[in-house]
């Protein structure tokens, strides 16, 4: 088994964010599968970082990943500020489409895990229509459960029996990060990738923000407008706290998330 080549990371409030863009991430994930390097990928933004600040288990789950991808412009701006000018946002839905397109030529096998059975059926149909050569070998919609709870042995056996190379995990943050960290050693697939709402987006059930809002760092405002009851508290709590903690660190008043 080949070990992973080191990719530079920066420390964002204790979370080690990889200095990558989508082409670099694709090349690295492809290399893992080709050489049997078993790991998992997290995608994080301000929400994931703040969850990690508040919970050491979540932070450890991120930092144990082979890649921690910057899925949010504030993290990209911090990467640029640290000298990584080629780094860019790795938006989960974009990464998913790019990898499915890339892996059409390789014959790699995909398993879809998360959301609901109805959503997975729509997602699989859409992916098969868009990428006719792709191999989707299974899908499972788990019941709602608290973050960090062990998966049933029967489900793990089903996933392993599919001989999937890549498992796409859409459980939302922080459930998917904890699930991947907890189950990585039990799953035979080479790569687990936590893409959250990408499964719902590509099923056609949830609208994505316009590209200009994504690039401006204002996607959070669009998402609040779409799902105010679920997301308003998250963003209005996390965004100011994130900026305050960054400022405190820059001024030498605090050192966050490193106990």
Image: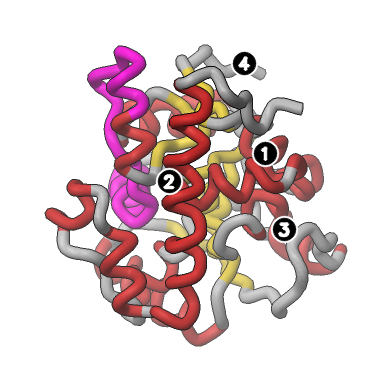
Task: Give the mark nearer the N terminus: 3 vs 2.
Answer: 2
Task: Give the mark nearer the N terminus: 1 vs 4.
Answer: 4
| Residue ranking furthest to the left | 212
| Residue 194 image offset from top left, x and y in percent | 54, 51
Mark 4 lies on residue: 3
* Residue 164 in sight from this viewpoint: yes
| Residue at image location 40% in from the left, 38% down from the top | 70
The part of the image, by quadrant, that contains residue 126 is bottom left
| Viewer-proximal residue among 88 and 98 | 88
| Quarter of the image with the N terminus in it | top right
Mark 2 lies on residue: 107
Task: Give the mark nearer the N terminus: 3 vs 1.
Answer: 1
- Label pair 3/2, CB-CB below 8 angstroms: no
Question: Residue 199 got which mark?
Answer: none
Mark 3 lies on residue: 161
| Residue ranking furthest to the bottom | 118
Is residue 213 left or right of 197 when viewed as pictured? Answer: left
Tell me the mark number nearer the camera, choosing from 3 and 1.
1
Q: Which residues are magenta?
A: 78-104
Task: Give the mark nearer the N terminus: 3 vs 4.
Answer: 4
User: Alpha-carbon neighbours of circle 2 within 10 Å: few (<14), some, or many (≥20)?
Assistant: few
Please say whether residue 8 is one of the residues in the magenta stretch. Answer: no
Secondary structure beneath dot 4 equals loop
Mark 1 lies on residue: 59
């Amino acid at each position: 088994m080949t070990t992973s080549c080191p990719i530079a990371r920066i420390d964002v409030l204790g979370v080690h964010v990889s200095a990558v863009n989508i082409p670099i991430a694709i090349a690295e994930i492809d290399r893992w599968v080709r050489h049997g390097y078993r790991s998992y990928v997290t995608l994080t933004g301000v929400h994931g970082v703040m969850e990690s600040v508040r919970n050491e288990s979540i932070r450890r789950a991120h930092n144990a990943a082979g890649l921690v991808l910057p899925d949010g412009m504030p993290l990209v701006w911090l990467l640029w500020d640290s000298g990584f000018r080629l780094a860019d946002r790795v938006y989960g839905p974009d990464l998913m489409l790019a990898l499915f397109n890339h892996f059409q030529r390789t014959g790699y096998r995909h398993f879809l895990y998360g959301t609901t059975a109805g959503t997975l059926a729509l997602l699989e149909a859409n992916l098969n229509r868009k990428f006719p050569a792709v191999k989707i070998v299974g899908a499972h919609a788990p019941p709602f459960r608290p973050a960090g709870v062990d998966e049933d042995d029967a489900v793990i056996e089903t996933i392993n029996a599919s001989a999937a190379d890549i498992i796409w995990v859409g459980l939302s943050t922080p459930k998917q990060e904890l699930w991947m960290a907890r189950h990585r050693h039990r799953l035979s697939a080479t790569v687990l990738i936590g893409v959250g709402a990408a499964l719902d987006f590509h099923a056609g059930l949830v609208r994505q923000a316009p590209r200009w809002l994504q690039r401006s760092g204002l996607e959070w405002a669009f998402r609040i407008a779409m799902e105010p009851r679920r997301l308003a508290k998250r963003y209005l709590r996390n965004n100011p706290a994130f900026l305050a903690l960054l400022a405190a660190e820059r001024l030498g008043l605090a050192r966050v998330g490193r106990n």
